[in-house]
Image (cartoon, helix red, strand yellow):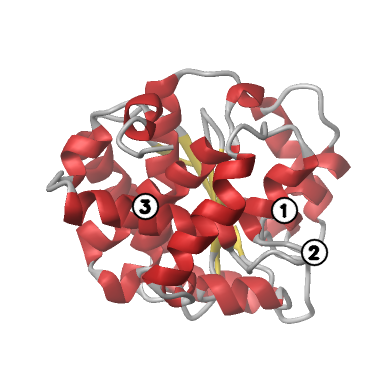
Amino acid sequence: MSIIHTDRWLEEDYHQPLNISKRLLKYFEDVTAAELYDYLIMHGMYRPVRDGKGTVEKLKTLDCWNIVLAESKRLKKLWNGPDIPIFIFPSDKNNSQIKRDFKGKAGVAFKDKLFMFLPEDIETNEIKALLIHEYNHICVLSKNKRKDDQYTLLDSVLIEGLAESAVKKILGEEYTSNWTSYYTEKELEIFFSKYIIPNKDVRKSERDHMKLLYGKGFYPKMLGYCVGYYLIQKLIKTEKLSYSELMSKSLTDITKLFVI
C-alpha cells in the first residue's frame, strides 16, 4: 500500500490546488486538471482558505499519513485487498453537509486509488473510520469486477451498507457516521419498499442514482446510505450472518438474501 506524500505537495501548492490536480493526472485518464479538481471538491476536498497552511501543519502534527499507512496495511491483510495509492488532503471547511453527515471528514474511492479529506481537529479513530469505509469500497469493487455503468442503485446501497458496517465492526458504533441514526428501523423499512425497490435497477450513470443514494431533492436525506446500513445490519442480526461471511459474498449473492 502506498501513501502518497501529499503533505509535501500541500507545503508547496496549498494555495494553487490546480497544481496539485496536475500532479494527480497520471493516475487518471481523459480528464483535465480543472475537471478533476471540481470532481474532488464535490466529494469534499478543500478549497483554499487564508489560514489553510495551518491546517496542513496540524494534520502533519497529528501524524495522519503514518496512521493511514499502518491502518491500510492492517486492512489489506484483513480483507485480502488490493494494493492502491492513497491520497490525503484537508477537507472543505465550509461544506455543511460534510460537517452534518460525516463529522467533517470525507473521501472517495475508485477501483485503483483512494482519497481522504480530513479536518484539522480529527482524532485517530475518526481517521481510521474513514479509511475503513473507503478501503472497504475498493475491496468490494475489486471482488465484483464490474464496469462502473453496470452497478445499480441497489448495488450502491449495499456497498455503502457494507462499508459503514465495517466501521461498526472494527471500531464500534460510536465511530459510525451521523447518518446511521437519522431514522428508525420502521422508517427505513418503508424507505426500502417505497424508494429503493422501485428504483433498484437505476444505473450509476443515470441522474436519479445519486439523488436516491444521497437523498437529494424531495427524498429523505442520505436515503441510500441509511437504507444500506440498515439492510446489512438486519442481515447480521436476523440471518445470523457474520460480517466476514457477508464480505465473502458477491453483491449478487447478498441481494438474493432479500425477498425482492
- SS for callout 3: helix
* Amino acid residing under circle 1: Lys
Marks 1 & 2, CB-CB < 8 Å contact: no
Residue at mark 2:
15
Position of residue 57 measured from the top left corner of the image (x, y, whole percent): 55, 73
Q: What type is the residue that disc 2 sits on?
A: His
Question: Few, some or many C-alpha atoms within 10 Å of disc 3 (few <14, some 14-19, many ≥20)?
Answer: many
52, above or below 108, in the image: below
Residue 151 on image: x %, y % = 58, 29
Residue located at (67% from left, 35% from top):
202
Mark 3 vs 1, N-terminal side: 1
Q: Give residue 255's mark.
A: none
Q: Check disc 1: other Cα within 10 Å, few if <14, some if 14-19, many if 20+.
A: some
In the rendered structure, are the residues bearing label 2 and label 3 in contact, judged by CB atoms less than 8 Å apart? Answer: no
State the separation of the CA atoms marked 1 and 2.
Answer: 32 Å
Residue nearer the viewer, 218 or 90: 218
- Taking 112 as reference, is 203 left or right? right
Judging by the rendered image, the residue that carries numbered circle 1 is 211
Mark nearer the N terminus (1 vs 2):
2
- Element assignment for label 2: loop
Spatial CA distance of label 3 from label 1 is 19 Å
Q: Judge the density around disc 2: few (<14), some (14-19), many (≥20) Cα neighbours within 10 Å.
A: some
Of circles 1 and 2, the one toward us is 1
Q: Is residue 7 visible?
A: no
Q: Which residue is mark 3?
A: 231
Q: Quadrant of residue 119?
A: bottom right
Comes first in the chain, label 2 or label 3? 2
Disc 3 to disc 1: CB gap under 8 Å: no
